[in-house]
Amino acid sequence: MVRRLLGYTVAIFVILLGWHITSLVIGSPALPTPIDTIPMLQRYAAQLAPDFLTSFYRVIVAMVIGTVIAMPLGLAIGRTPKLDAFLAPILYILYPIPKIVLLPVLLVLLGLADAPKIVLIAITIFFQVLVTVRDAAKAVPEQAVLSVRSLGASRLDIFKDVVVPASLPDLFTALRISSGTAVAILFFAEAIAGRTGLGYFIVDSWAMLNYPRMFAGIIVMAFLGVLLYEIFDFAERRLTRWRKVGQ
Amino acid sequence: MLNYENVSLTYPGTSTPVKALDRYSLTVAKGEPVALIGPSGCGKSTSLLLATGLLSPSEGEVLVDGKPVNKPRRETALILQDFGLLPWKTVFENAALGLCIRRFSKAERKTRVERALEQVGLSDFAKMYPGELSGGMRQRLALARTLALDVDVMLMDEPLSALDAMLREGLQDLLLTLWQQRGYTQVLVTHSIEEAVFLGRRIVVLSPRPGRVMTIIDNPKMGTFDYRGTEGFYRTCQLVRKALKAETSRSEGSSHGA
Ligand SMILES: Nc1ncnc2c1ncn2[C@@H]1O[C@H](COP(=O)(O)OP(=O)(O)O)[C@@H](O)[C@H]1O
Ligand SMILES: [Mg+2]
């Protein structure tokens, strides 16, 4: 824990230094120095705090919904070759489509508030998790399955004792990686629709040509990304403690 | 009693069907320890899977106590080469797995697992994960998992082949002790002639694929720990070696002819 905090402290210092130097070299008002920006965090705290909470709520709810739907489906597809043969081509066609193209449709159908943003992120996470979990479930060592089946395990026992725990590490890797994508989509959706969330705060500052304010929003958005990453990392360490011991 | 009656098994395979066993017949008496040895790929593992009921024969029948096996039987245990341990479960949970699946009560699980871990010398490691154990300890854990159950047929697929020579003898002794204590019907698949002779009252030599029983060598003197050093042990090893050689040269002869 102490080492993690130390790591982040050093990282923040290096990033601020790099930012400061870049800003001095470029010398444009569009890239203010951290010294100009950081006081803005305090000045606009009254707006940033609720926007942060709104954005956090949207992204975390969306990721949970996407995962909860995709996980059982991915496990089932990965362990049922016939289902996989049927669904894999559908998945391969839909998977690479950037789900952001659905934003206009969702805005028309669901309005400008939380719903379209949550659904858009949930769809993206759904595909990431579905593909990852399916592959992980497929790759479960047959020996482990056989030896548990020889003990008389039912299909449900095998999912509970073998397939789910074997897939968890890959699930969490997918979640940590896609938390970046989720924040990017969130920014885009909030920038385009509605008047709430960090995405709106950032483009609103831009419209006002208030670049220090804009960068304050960017800092908070970066913090949101780190927070998500740490949440998944924490959950992973709690749920896959056995991996720490090294094979 | 374990009984294979003219069992053939053909795997569908990815391109062409693979016939793994061809009219395989073998009877293992109740409480008898048998060692199975034969060239790689001849169908040894397949024959064990058939005995557990995880596979069904294409032809013929596999019977345990006179009843055809068509699904896993509660009293039959299978130990695989990589031990089949679950890395996400602790030593205790791994040992308790069979009991959990059979819905034993928590208290019953605790007493049985503690006794089984004690028997294999793992009592002090109950809270660890398999990843923290040595190869020999993992093997003993796999044994504990079956010892916690009421097993009367014990099937082992090259259970010691992943271990180094020093550990193997110790574990062979443990296997002998456990068989003597429990008196289960035992089929041990092994690569090692010495292991087959140490642990098999009969040594069954299989032909190359498709596997058939070619020779059965009686080994009535097995069952003591100092058998290893004796003249009789050495002579039986020679007999098995010869039988295996005959198998190999026969198959080479036929493949040249084809
Ligand atoms: N699931 C399977 N599908 C197709 N062929 C298989 C399968 N399992 C085993 N075989 C083939 O059947 C033969 C016997 O396999 P196996 O019983 O594992 O042999 P052994 O244990 O004696 O080495 C081998 O040629 C192997 O390649
Ligand atoms: Mg084998």
Image (cartoon, helix red, strand yellow):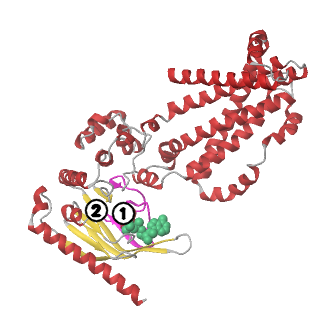
Q: Locate residue B24, reporting x and y percent.
A: 35, 75
Q: Locate residue B51, reporting x and y percent.
A: 36, 63
Which of these two is toward me, B127 or B252?
Answer: B252
Q: Cβ–Cβ below 8 Å for labels 2 and 1? A: yes
Q: Which SS class for mark 1?
A: helix
The residue under label 1 is which amino acid type?
Leu
Residue at the (13%, 66%) spot, across then down: B233
| Badge 1: residue crowd in 10 Å (few <14, some 14–19, many ≥20) | many
Question: Horizontally, is B61 left or right of A115 in the view?
Answer: left
Say the numbered circle drawn on residue B48: 1
Residue at the (30%, 39%) spot, across then down: B113
Question: Horizontally, is B238 left or right of B98 in the view?
Answer: left
The residue under label 2 is which amino acid type?
Val
B74 in magenta: yes
Task: Provide the residue span drawn in magenta.
Answer: B52-79
Q: Locate residue A194, reporting x and y percent.
A: 86, 25
The chain under label 2 reads B
Q: Is residue A122 above or below residue A157?
A: above
Q: Which SS class for mark 2?
A: strand
Identify the residue under disc 2. Answer: B187
**Does the residue tagged 1 have its C-beta within 8 Å of any atom of ligand 1?**
no
Q: Locate residue B98, reporting x and y percent.
A: 37, 45
Q: Is residue A187 above or below residue A96?
A: above
Question: Horizontally, is B60 left or right of A208 in the view?
Answer: left
